[in-house]
């Protein structure tokens, strides 16, 4: 890896050249910034990966069965495995999707599962992202660049090739699509992940469209081309949240969605990737129940563990949480992107009491977790190597079968005291090498 | 790479091509005027501004050299032309490829550095080089004919426009006119404005070179109308 490390500045130059950025709004102003790349790759042995792979496939398969059940027979609720309060009060639950079965019965086509590697050498799942998990483009393009500038690094290290991600996406889209073309639906240039939308369109050969390029006629979705021809759309990989997807069904003020797309979807004329309504399964409250889902649907023991989690919703857990709040991390189930995560140890007394009262008054709003002491990874800070907290987002693609991409996004915190690794909060990323041994 | 184009993308392809070519031709042209300032009255830039319909708000030749190149607020500066090219290009990554787009990124980087250092015109040579590289990459990577056609149409139209304004010799303009612009227009999908298309054909084919400024202005207007009508 030495040769790659000595050329680490070139990697970032190449990233700049290709416009590898993410957008962020600060004080109401849109700014694009680079997502800093660290050249010291995270290595995962082939053996360790096999276990991760097994656990991730198992988890995503169970989550897909859960979604099928929730929008169908609701057996898991009737059997009291998951309380209905956690299903129907979830912001991600969409009554419109009741009884709607997506093409090929796949709900979560692209799942981004966040994990950390504990100091006890155990991998813990931190959260599931089943709506629009982003970030795969960064390690994908980073690998392309690093292979180019330091071929000897890859000659000397048996790293599994990760350049099949676009093909995995395309195969999945082709598998679930109805008659018509493949489209990636973007909110537009000023979305934080616009680079990724356009990069995947380039790499998969799909059309990159905004809501204004698409329209519905007779429950079918069309892409309007120059000269007025309408092209039937068979699958939409949407990068727009559920609430903005269709102003006729969800947020009426949405200008970025496609009116009546949900009717076309409900009629079975277009596949939507990921399926609308998935938010009910990646709700932070539902996370607690995923190991139970695995046992319930698959009759298997979970391969991968959740971080130890408590639900203040349950009286017994609430009592424990209130007694041990100082050492726990509290998460607001409605928040994402590293926001709404509160490390109680660091709170002032006033703030601590405020949170304690909120847990008492709004128990459904929170989950509490033990702080997982996860492994630090080495990163460059200027010319020094320092240790920082890092997580791993693994990408699991479900089409004809469920496949884990042999790579992932390793995000690290640049702040020595922080556990928050999100790019929106100043973090950087590394390549993730799955070793071929 | 798919060959379908929405109206919005067609428009962006057209203007991307025009702005990239405008950056290249403007840098070439301004070099000549700055050169003639060396031996002349130091006011050649006024003529340059007049020909390109740029409002002469410059204090002197030095002010012109700085602001025409780098003024971020002025619509006619080379910097703004490049930003406009970028604004169109960034929404066309999947159509023009990341590689082609990268040359605009690189040109922007040079421009920003030169702006900070108040660099000389000669330091902007890489910008011209990147514009040429952009076209090389387009030729290499944009394999769908409809997209390539719109890019070529935009590029040719801009070349004619700038050369007519700068009163470049007729032979050069005629070469661009006869070199395929009619084909580019006719290859646009679904003719919706047949009268204009016929008038354009007549103008290009019957044109002799006399009063070429006026005729070319009509040709440019005609192409713009035909293109817009097909969006």
Image (tube, coloured by chain):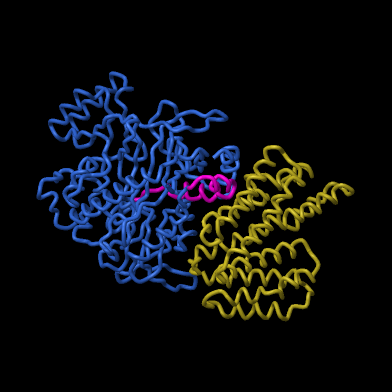
Chain colours: A blue, B yellow
Q: Main secondary structure of the magenta part?
A: helix
x and y percentages locating residue A406 in the rendered image: 41, 50
Q: Is residue A151 magenta?
A: yes
Query: Going by the picture, which residue comes out furthest to the right?
Result: B39
Image point 56% across, 53% down: which residue? Answer: B87
Res. A427 image quadrant: top left
Left-right relation of A5 to B120: left
Query: Going by the picture, which residue comes out furthest to the top?
Result: A349
Query: Going by the picture, which residue comes out furthest to the front?
Result: A437
Region in magenta:
A132-158
Total marks shown come to 0
Left-right relation of B35 to B10: right
Left-right relation of A367 to A46: left
Query: Going by the picture, which residue comes out furthest to the left?
Result: A79
Image point 31% across, 19% down: which residue? Answer: A348
Res. A260 image quadrant: bottom left
Q: Which residue is at the front of the view, A229 or A137?
A: A137
On screen, residue B89 above or below A393: below
Q: Which residue is at the front of the view, B26 or A164?
A: A164
Image point 64% across, 79% down: which residue? Answer: B199
x and y percentages locating residue A58 in the rendered image: 26, 50
Q: Is residue A233 magenta?
A: no
Left-right relation of B21 to B146: right
Q: Which residue is at the front of the view, A268 or B208?
A: A268
x and y percentages locating residue A16 in the rendered image: 57, 45
x and y percentages locating residue B223 in the rendered image: 62, 71
């Amino acid at each position: 890896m030495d040769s790659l490390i000595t050329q680490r500045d070139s990697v970032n130059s190449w990233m700049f050249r290709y416009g590898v950025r993410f957008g962020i709004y600060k004080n109401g102003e849109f700014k694009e910034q680079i997502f800093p790349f660290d050249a010291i790759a995270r290595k995962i042995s082939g053996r360790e990966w096999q276990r991760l792979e097994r656990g991730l496939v198992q988890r995503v398969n169970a989550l897909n069965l859960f979604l099928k059940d929730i929008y169908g027979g609701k057996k898991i609720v009737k059997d009291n495995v998951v309380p209905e309060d956690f299903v129907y009060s979830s912001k991600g639950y969409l009554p419109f999707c009741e009884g709607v079965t997506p093409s090929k019965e796949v709900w979560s086509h692209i799942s981004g599962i966040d994990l950390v590697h504990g100091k006890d050498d155990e991998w813990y799942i931190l959260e599931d992202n089943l709506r629009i998990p982003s970030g795969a483009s960064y390690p994908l393009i980073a690998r392309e660049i690093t292979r180019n500038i330091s071929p000897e690094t890859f000659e000397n290290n048996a790293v599994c090739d990760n350049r099949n991600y676009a093909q995995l996406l395309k195969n999945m889209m082709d598998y679930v699509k109805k008659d018509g073309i493949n489209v990636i639906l973007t909110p537009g240039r000023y979305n934080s992940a616009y680079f990724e939308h356009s990069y995947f369109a380039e790499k998969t050969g799909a059309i990159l469209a905004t809501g204004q390029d698409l329209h519905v006629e007779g429950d079918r979705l069309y892409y309007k081309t120059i000269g007025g021809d309408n092209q039937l759309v068979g699958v939409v990989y949407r990068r727009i949240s559920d609430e903005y997807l269709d102003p006729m069904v969800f947020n009426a003020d949405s200008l970025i969605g496609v009116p009546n797309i949900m009717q076309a979807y409900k009629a079975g004329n277009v596949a939507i990737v990921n399926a609308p309504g998935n938010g009910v399964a990646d709700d932070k409250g539902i996370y607690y129940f995923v190991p139970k889902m695995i046992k319930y649907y698959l009759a298997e023991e979970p391969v991968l563990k959740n971080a130890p989690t408590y639900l203040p919703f349950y009286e017994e857990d609430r009592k424990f949480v209130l007694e041990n709040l100082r050492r726990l991390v509290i998460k607001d189930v409605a928040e994402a992107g590293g926001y709404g995560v509160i490390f109680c140890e660091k709170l002032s007394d006033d703030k601590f009491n405020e949170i304690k009262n909120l847990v008492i008054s709004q128990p459904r709003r929170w989950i509490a977790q033990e702080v997982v002491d996860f492994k630090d990874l080495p990163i460059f800070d200027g010319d020094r190597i320092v240790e920082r907290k890092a997580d791993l987002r693994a990408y699991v693609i479900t089409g004809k079968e469920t496949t884990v991409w042999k790579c992932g996004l390793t995000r690290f915190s640049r702040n020595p005291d922080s556990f928050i690794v999100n790019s929106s909060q100043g973090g950087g990323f590394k390549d993730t090498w799955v070793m071929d041994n | 790479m798919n060959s379908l184009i929405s109206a919005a993308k067609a428009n962006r392809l057209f203007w991307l091509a025009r702005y990239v070519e405008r950056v290249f031709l403007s840098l070439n042209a301004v070099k000549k005027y700055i050169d003639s300032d060396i031996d002349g009255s130091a006011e050649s830039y006024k003529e340059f501004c007049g020909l390109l319909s740029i409002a002469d708000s410059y204090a002197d030749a030095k002010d012109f050299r700085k602001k025409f190149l780098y003024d971020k607020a002025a619509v006619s500066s080379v910097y703004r032309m490049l930003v406009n090219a970028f604004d169109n290009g960034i929404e066309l990554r999947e159509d023009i490829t990341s590689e082609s787009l990268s040359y605009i990124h690189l040109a922007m980087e040079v421009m920003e550095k030169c702006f900070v250092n108040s660099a000389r015109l000669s330091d902007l040579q890489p910008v011209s080089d990147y514009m040429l590289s952009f076209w090389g990459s387009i030729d290499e990577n944009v394999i769908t004919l409809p997209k390539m056609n719109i890019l070529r149409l935009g590029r040719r139209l801009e070349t004619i426009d700038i050369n007519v304004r700068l009163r470049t010799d007729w032979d050069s303009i005629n070469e661009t006119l006869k070199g395929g612009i009619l084909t580019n227009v006719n290859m646009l999908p679904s003719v919706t404005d047949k009268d204009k298309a016929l008038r354009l054909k007549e103008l290009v084919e019957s044109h002799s070179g006399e009063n070429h400024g006026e005729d070319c202005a009509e040709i440019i207007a005609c192409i713009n109308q035909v293109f817009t009508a097909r969006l």
